[in-house]
Amino acid sequence: MNTKKIAIAIDGPAGAGKSSISKVVANELGYLYIDTGSMYRGVTWAVLDSQIDVKDQAAVEALLPSLNLTLEPTATACKVYIKGKDVTSLIRQQQINDNVSTIASYKGVRKYLVERQQEMAAVGGVILDGRDIGSVVLPNAELKIYLTASVDARAKRRWLEVQGTSNEQTLDEIKKNVVSRDEMDKNREESPLVCVEDAVVVDSSDMNFDETVAYILNLVQETINHE
């Protein structure tokens, strides 16, 4: 059996299940999972914590050198540290959801984080997920996947996730947020969300979690066999 370790890029819109699926796939393969979205969320948390206006691009970018943002991959997730503080549990709040697309649209923020992502991915045997992995971060990845699902499917999954939490919202509110983030991610000037030509499109609208994981693991094995 071919044991070559490849680089896997998984892109797609908000709520497609990229992070949760990437974690399980990485665990099954013994790969390193790098949650790029959590890095943007970490920067967003730091901006809000510093009481900087998220619309002030210059002020946001001026904050970056002092963040000392680091990622600590674990067996089940990626811990995010800002200035040595573990902020992992703080970056999934609704306030972060509402502002992360704005922060991620800034050229200086993307440059700062993409450089770190490329350094971490250089070893191979990695899965990175985000919006611009196949197009910008890892354009030479052996396997590129565009993981998507309908707006309704993504909104319902996100709604089920937040039931009983402090972030509880109505399904309609979540659907509006999903549509809004799609528009922002696709239309921003800097590294917009795009499905690159050599990506395999995986639409999980009618697949459950385990079926999606199995489908992607099969794609990985096919790719390795052809290397």
Image (cartoon, rainbow, N blue to C red):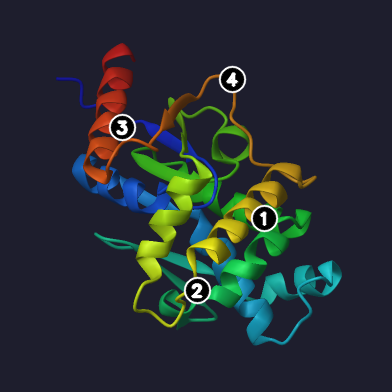
Q: Mark 1 or 3 closer to N-term?
A: 1
Using a 10 Å C-alpha cutoff, classify the residue at mark 1 as few (fewer than 14 neighbours), some (14 to 19) or many (20 or more). Answer: some
Quarter of the rendering occupied by the N terminus? top left
Task: Quote the CA–CA distance across marks 2 and 1.
Answer: 19 Å
**Residue at 81% over, 70% down:** 55
- Front tag of 1 and 4: 1
Q: Quadrant of residue 136?
A: top right
Q: Mark 2 or 1 closer to N-term?
A: 2
Using a 10 Å C-alpha cutoff, classify the residue at mark 4 as few (fewer than 14 neighbours), some (14 to 19) or many (20 or more). Answer: few
Q: In the image, what residue type sits under mark 2?
A: Ile
| Residue placed most toward the observer, 206 or 216 | 206
Give yes or no for contact between labels 2 and 1 (Cβ–Cβ under 8 Å). no
Q: In the image, what residue type sits under mark 1?
A: Ser
Judging by the rendered image, the residue that carries numbered circle 3 is 216
Judging by the rendered image, the residue that carries numbered circle 4 is 197
Q: In the image, what residue type sits under mark 4?
A: Glu
Judging by the rendered image, the residue that carries numbered circle 1 is 180
**Residue at 33% over, 62% down:** 77
Task: Quote the CA–CA distance across marks 4 and 3.
Answer: 18 Å
Residue 79: % across, % down: 39, 69
Task: Quote the CA–CA distance across marks 1 and 4.
Answer: 25 Å
Numbered disc 3: secondary structure: helix
With respect to residue 172, does 169 lie above or below? below
Residue 65: % across, % down: 69, 71
Q: Quadrant of residue 164?
A: bottom left
**Residue at 76% over, 72% down:** 60
Numbered disc 1: secondary structure: helix
With respect to residue 170, does 125 lie above or below? above
Give yes or no for contact between labels 4 and 2 (Cβ–Cβ under 8 Å). no
Q: In the image, what residue type sits under mark 3?
A: Ile
Residue 190: % across, % down: 76, 46
